[in-house]
Image (spheres, rainbow, N blue to C red):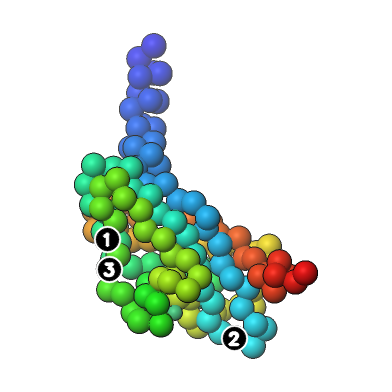
Amino acid sequence: MKRWILVVLCLLPVWVQAEEVEVRDAWVRLPPPVADTAAAYLRLINHGGRELVLLGVRANVAGEAMFHGPGMRPLGTVRIPAGGEYRFAPGAAHVMLMKLKQPLHAGDSVHLVLRRAKGKPIQVELPVRDMRRLERP
Ligand SMILES: [Cu+2]
């Protein structure tokens, strides 16, 4: 019985973090073959009771990554109010992946690490999607 309680306590911090921030609609747009940049999109929903502040981002496939607003304007921090959400979406804010280390292919998986002002970083897996294929009639 005691052992079970211990297991539950060990799992709790991970569970709390997972419940606090929900990630949806996460994907990377397949860039043209010659490009060394790509854009990543995702929705972050803050179910927690306090503001979520993101200070930066890293990606396994990119030498550099940062938050961009519309028109490629760098965003220092991203703030998501308690109970609110933030959308990185085409035509709006996005996560800019720069200095790509390798060519991306549709179906590849990209790993993002979002650094928070407080608490553990948020880890996200994003599939690479070829929008040209989807937009074709
Ligand atoms: Cu950009």
Residue 135, quarter of picture: bottom right
Q: Is residue 57 above or below residue 100?
A: above
Q: Is residue 108 left or right of residue 28?
A: right
Q: Amino acid at mark 3?
A: Thr
The answer to whether residue 121 is visible is yes
Q: Residue 91 location, x and y as percent?
A: 47, 74
Q: Is residue 36 left or right of residue 105?
A: left
Answer with mark 2 or mark 3, whichever residue precedes in sequence: 2
Residue 93, quarter of picture: bottom left
Q: How many marks?
A: 3
- The residue pinned by badge 3 equals 77
- The residue pinned by badge 2 equals 35
Q: Is residue 90 above or below residue 124?
A: below
Answer with mark 1 or mark 2, whichever residue precedes in sequence: 2
| CA separation in Å, label 1 and label 2 | 30 Å
Disc 1 and disc 2 in contact, CB within 8 angstroms: no
Q: Which mark is residue 79?
A: 1
- Packing grade of label 3 (10 A; few <14, some 14-19, many >=20) is some
The answer to whether residue 66 is visible is no
Q: Residue 134 location, x and y as percent?
A: 71, 66
Q: Secondary structure at mark 1?
A: strand
Q: Is residue 56 above or below residue 82?
A: below
Q: Amino acid at mark 1?
A: Arg
Q: Secondary structure at mark 3?
A: loop
Disc 1 and disc 3 in contact, CB within 8 angstroms: yes
Disc 2 and disc 3 in contact, CB within 8 angstroms: no
| CA separation in Å, label 2 and label 3 | 26 Å
